Image (cartoon, coloured by chain):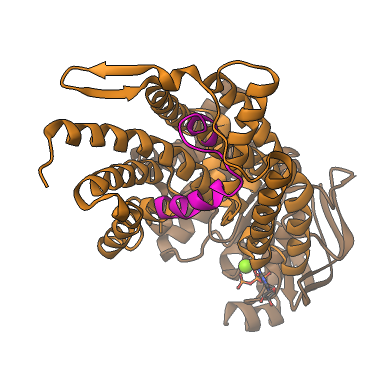
């Protein structure tokens, strides 16, 4: 098999684009783990809901999905807050009552079971509301093909998806790094009881974290909706990949997840090119195994004692 | 200023405090001494709302604070420097101090308090940009106290400020606690196993055994007390 340089370049570009999306999904999952110590097995369903909300907005209001995806993300983020307030809080209080003062109640198996239950519930809900048949969100931008010299071409939709992903990641980083709320989120992740004692309302921090995490997943779903198919179990297909990204990057580490997202996106693209597309799905797991072999704590994990 | 009335508390089913009572007057240094597992830390946790008591009341400045969330209690001016120091390991020394002042908005005052903390512990200034998790044990303890001061406390709760420190540093820390009390007029409640040091700087103290206060007195009285000398001072 001879690989043309243009083909290689094209796959690198695709890899970076999909890597940015993996980064957005992975960052949401890693934040919830880092701040709340919750392994959220329903994360993929927020991605799915983001795609369907975008679809619904497009059919109801009309307009381009790339403009409506952020609105869908905010709506799904509100669902995330509602879940935290209505479901998580009471279980949290119950565990707090039973266990005393330790701060990591979200690690409890009951919470993990709860997120698995939510995942099933949302998939069924999507089946009822939107039906089992895959749809695609119409956007004129997918038909707008950008041609570069040398025969390289990709749709404007992919370029926009990439730009939105990068802007989101940069924005999130700046928020966590430079705002007072962002600092309180980091403090809660590092030492929740100490954060409470300096006056941080950690229930509010959990609300914000749920909003950001579910909203990020939804945004990814919304901007990929016009490019790929949308169907009720699409979240189940992506959640394993999201966990691979999070574990490879270092559990709870935002920058690590971003790097791992790009690494895995690129590796998949190139793996598909060199090994054949049938191996594409395996590549992510191979990368994870290699990274964990060299650094058991992930790319940037284990920085703190 | 602070009154703990007949508090009982438990971790799950394990009872840790049985009807404990104590009070701290404005401007005082009061210490709680007792052996491992006596309930000193638990008492402080109940005061700052980290642990809900089963029964009893905690009154601060004539107001019951039982059932309030820790962040609400902190905003009343009760600042808790917890066991394990309560630092944010991946933040710098300066960021930790700024987090200490999280609730405050008085920029100039915060800056002045920062200077005060740096004057108490010059080494913190030198290590301003170092991550808290990489400080030595003694430096971490200084940062923990400094971070507590940044909260602008009316009442400062210190849990084992001498834990794991070399004798010379223990002296320094207690001297500094004394200085904070005198110069800043901060009321202080200390939980300590180092009974000698704690009693030497305290106006009053309580001895806790198995979740109850068994003795109360001035620092001087307790230093001379037969039971205290035998059980806690090893004399
Ligand atoms: N998080 C916890 N979960 C369960 N039990 C706890 C917890 N923290 C403390 N206890 C128990 O409560 C009792 C009182 O403990 P506490 O930490 O208040 O003692 P202490 O006087 O501070 O001791 P030390 O001097 O060793 O710090 C002990 O029997 C201890 O085992
Ligand atoms: Mg203790």
Residue drawn at point x = 33 percent, y = 58 percent: A282
Describe residue B17's horizontal placement relative to residue A42 as left or right: right
Asked whether residue A32 is in view, the answer is no
Q: Nearer the viewer, residue B58 or A19?
A: A19
Q: Which residues are magenta?
A: A221-245
Tally of numbered tags: 0
Q: Position of residue B34 (x, y in %)?
A: 67, 73
Asked whether residue A131 is in view, the answer is yes
Question: Is residue B27 in the magenta section?
Answer: no
Describe residue A271's horizontal placement relative to residue B235 as left or right: left
Q: Position of residue A55 (x, y in %)?
A: 62, 29
Q: Position of residue B106 (x, y in %)?
A: 62, 23
Q: Colour of chain A?
A: orange
Question: Which SS type dominates the magenta stretch?
Answer: helix
Above or below: residue A117 compared with residue B60: below
Picture quadrant of residue B200: bottom right
Question: Is residue A227 in the magenta section?
Answer: yes
Q: Nearer the viewer, residue B177 or A90?
A: A90
Residue drawn at point x = 38 percent, y = 35 percent: A20
Q: Position of residue B103 (x, y in %)?
A: 65, 33
Residue drawn at point x = 67 percent, y = 65 percent: B41
Q: Residue furthest left?
A: A2
Residue drawn at point x = 54 percent, y = 46 percent: A234
């Amino acid at each position: 098999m001879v690989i043309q340089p243009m083909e290689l370049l094209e796959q690198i570009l695709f890899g970076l684009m999909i890597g940015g999306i993996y980064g957005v999904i992975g960052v949401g999952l890693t934040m919830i783990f880092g701040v709340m110590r919750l392994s959220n097995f329903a994360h993929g369903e927020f991605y799915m809901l983001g795609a369907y909300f975008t679809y619904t907005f497009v059919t109801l209001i009309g307009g381009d999905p790339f403009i409506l995806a952020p609105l869908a993300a905010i709506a799904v983020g509100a669902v995330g807050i509602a879940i935290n307030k209505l479901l998580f809080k009471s279980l949290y209080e119950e565990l707090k009552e039973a266990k005393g003062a330790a701060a990591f109640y979200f690690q409890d198996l009951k919470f993990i079971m709860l997120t698995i239950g939510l995942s099933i519930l949302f998939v069924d809900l999507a089946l009822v509301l939107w039906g089992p048949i895959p749809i695609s969100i119409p956007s004129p931008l997918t038909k707008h093909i950008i041609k570069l010299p040398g025969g390289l071409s990709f749709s404007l939709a992919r370029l926009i998806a990439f730009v939105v992903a990068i802007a989101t990641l940069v924005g999130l980083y700046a928020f966590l790094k430079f705002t007072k709320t962002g600092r309180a989120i980091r403090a809660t992740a590092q030492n929740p009881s100490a954060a409470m004692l300096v006056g941080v309302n950690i229930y509010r921090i959990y609300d914000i974290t749920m909003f950001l995490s579910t909203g990020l997943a939804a945004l990814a779903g919304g901007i990929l909706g016009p490019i790929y198919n949308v169907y009720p179990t699409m979240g189940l297909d992506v959640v394993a990949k999201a966990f691979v990204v999070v574990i490879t990057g270092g559990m709870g580490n935002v920058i690590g997840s971003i790097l791992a997202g790009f690494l895995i996106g690129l590796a998949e693209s190139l793996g598909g090119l060199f090994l054949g597309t049938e191996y594409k799905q395996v590549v992510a797991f191979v990368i994870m195994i290699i990274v964990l072999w060299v650094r058991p704590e992930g790319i940037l994990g284990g920085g703190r004692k | 200023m602070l009154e703990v009335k007949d508090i009982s508390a438990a971790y799950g089913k394990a009872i840790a405090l049985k009807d404990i009572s104590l009070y701290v007057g404005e401007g005082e240094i009061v210490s709680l001494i007792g052996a491992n597992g006596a309930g000193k830390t638990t008492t402080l946790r109940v005061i700052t709302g980290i642990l809900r008591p089963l029964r009893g009341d905690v009154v601060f400045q004539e107001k019951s604070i039982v059932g309030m969330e820790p962040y609400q209690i902190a905003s009343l001016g009760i600042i808790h420097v917890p066991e394990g120091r309560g630092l944010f390991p991946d933040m710098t020394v300066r960021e930790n101090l700024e987090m200490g002042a999280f609730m405050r908005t008085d920029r100039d005052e915060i800056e002045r308090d920062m200077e005060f903390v740096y004057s108490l512990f010059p080494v913190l200034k030198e290590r301003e940009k170092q991550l808290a998790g990489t400080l030595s044990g003694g430096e971490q303890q200084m940062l923990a106290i400094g971070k507590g001061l940044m909260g602008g406390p009316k009442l400062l709760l210190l849990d084992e400020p001498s834990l794991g420190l070399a004798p010379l540093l223990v002296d320094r820390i207690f001297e500094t606690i004394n200085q904070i009390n005198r110069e800043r007029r901060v009321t202080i409640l200390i939980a300590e196993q180092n009974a000698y040091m704690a009693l030497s700087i305290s106006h009053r103290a309580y001895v806790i055994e198995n979740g109850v206060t068994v003795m109360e007195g001035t620092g001087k009285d307790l230093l001379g007390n037969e039971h205290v000398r035998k059980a806690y001072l090893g004399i």
